[in-house]
Amino acid sequence: AKGKANKGGLALSKAIRSAQSKGGVTGPMHAALNTTCLDFKKAAAVSEFTLDDRGLDVAKKAPTKEGVKTVFAGESWINVEHRIRSAAKPLGAPIDDDAFVAEALSLDGFRAIPASLSRRLMPRRPAWSFETSSGRLHHREAAAFKQWLEELREMFSERGGYPPAFEQNLQVWRQLWRVLERCDVAVLVVDARHPLLHLPPALVHHVSRTLRKPLVVVLNKLDTVAPEDAQRWAELLREGIPGVSGIVGYSKESLPPGAHRDLPIGRAALIDECHRVAPGACSRSAGDPEAPVVPTEEAGTILAATPDCAEPGQGVAAGRLLLGLIGHPNVGKSSLVNSIMGGKVVSVKATPGHTKTLQTLILDDRTCLCDSPGVVFPRLEVPREVQIVGMLIPLAQVREPFSALRWVMEHSLKPLPEMLNLKPASMAQVVELRESGVDALDLKDVGEAEESAPLPWSPMLLCAMYAQQRGLVKSGGPDCLKAGMEILEKVLDGKLPYVVAPPQSCDLSPPTVEGSADSEDSDWQVDDDDYESEREDPEYRKKVAEGDLLGVFGEERHGPGSGSIKSRKKQTKLRKQREAEKVEEAM
């Protein structure tokens, strides 16, 4: 039925375009069709799949660790084609695209985001207790998450434009919920090259105002930015963003001694800062005689797989301060953990979402660490190309690299063509590329120029010249798509550096806080009748009491030898015969 619905939608779209091109639809119907088709800004915000296609049918799928993987919405080919057409625009020229979303990342913009919007950009975990059955808890979480996705889709549709990527897998959000519930101090790891990108307002609001826990920000990868920029970012984040309790720098590479005078750096600085901002009841000093002593060989041991409902401060973590490591994918959380532990204790990979489940490790006799998978938050002010450069989207899912390369060309430390050893293109070369089928530069925005004079760069022209340099050919012309992916891969590997400089002047006065935390943010884990299961019949309660989880979710239990269709039919037939015999005996 879903396949037929999708095909029907495609057929309707083709019929509308065909009728308009032939002039077969006139009058009010023609005006309505034009209104629908010309509103591309809203249409671009719609994902290709529906919520049912994501497998979020309530009470049909129990939570499993195998399903913990990052899931993003697919882009339509119309959106991709529109961005490819804009790749010929030279740098600095206005982009003629109704669905284009300009980057609005700034410290002032971050502080101006209302609390009501921040709460809507993060799914809330429904109420639960240790007496709640796993089936009912799953039903509540799935229903709440499905409703959140619906509301978020409407929000993006109202804004219009190309939708950003964000995590759409409930299993990954569950890992973040549990880490935030268990930890005493939340440690948010950000990339020092673009800190505001990796600092979701919804997460900062949730930790500081809803959970009311300390938040320590770690500026990771300090070796990729200038020391003065790192210190300026630390000052701005500490004083300009409410809810940030402390700032620590970190880098697995060696740093010049004394370069970061006002920024604490390293493993010891991170642990001390977390103990400083932690509540007094949770923190124990190293000299506390009641603090448990951990042997040297025990430090760094993975404790155990964290249970679904773990109470803070219980089990092996009792008596130690529990740090919850959170943040976006590919900001270096796993590398940070390995560097802190002094060896490889967690796996590291460049693909976003490599860390699947949370795990707890012992740092010392008073501190333990809970590592979590990276979660991409929905952001209204972040375009998709910035997420690509920030490595929030896997390179394998990037369908066009040109919009991301435009952003890199505007923020690279040195001109990108210079780092690639490319010479400026002339008018004759642009005309030659156009004859080969590549529209590398929009000449309408260039004006009159001599035939031998150098022309401004565009992302498509950059890729075309790089393809000619590398010998990347397709259909007799330069393969710009493959060239663009190669350049983008160099950017993500750090071979072509970029950086976002901190603002030199900024208003650091305390922002106006919307509402009261006691009145507005107390809805975290509050009972809601809408989350209750509708199947509260005696049979359902009997299955719950017997521990028949498969029966609770409407699935039939399969024993050994009952995997084939033929065997199941045979068992069904035998069961009906036994039931008929019982009826005859009763008569």
Image: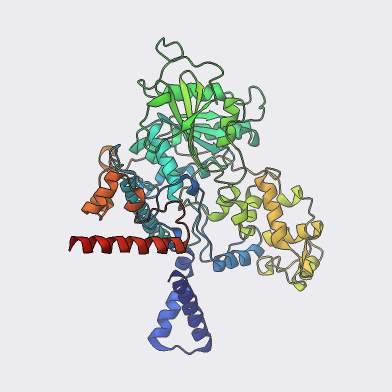
Q: Tell me: residue 271, above or below residue 525.
A: above
- Outermost residue toward the front in this view: 585
Q: Where is residue 138 in the image (x, y as percent from the top left)?
A: 35, 48
The answer to which of 413 and 303 lies nearer the viewer is 303
Q: Position of residue 30 (x, y in %)?
A: 43, 84
The answer to whether residue 333 is visible is yes
Q: Position of residue 13 (x, y in %)?
A: 48, 77
Q: In this view, does 582 lie to the left or right of 36?
A: left
Residue in the image at 52% along x and 45% along y: 197
Q: Where is residue 581 in the image (x, y as percent from the top left)?
A: 26, 62
Q: Tell me: residue 200, above or below residue 61.
A: above
Residue in the image at 24% along x and 49% along y: 541
Q: Tell me: residue 173, above or below residue 273.
A: below
The answer to which of 334 and 420 lies nearer the viewer is 334
Residue in the image at 66% along x and 61% along y: 90
The answer to whether residue 509 is visible is no
The image quarter in which residue 112 lies: top left
- Outermost residue toward the left in this view: 587
Residue in the image at 32% along x and 49% along y: 140
Specify the quadrant that holds the C terminus. Answer: bottom left
The image quarter in which residue 226 lies: top right
Specify the quadrant that holds the N terminus. Answer: bottom left
The number of numbered badges drawn on the structure is: 0
Q: Colour mode?
A: rainbow
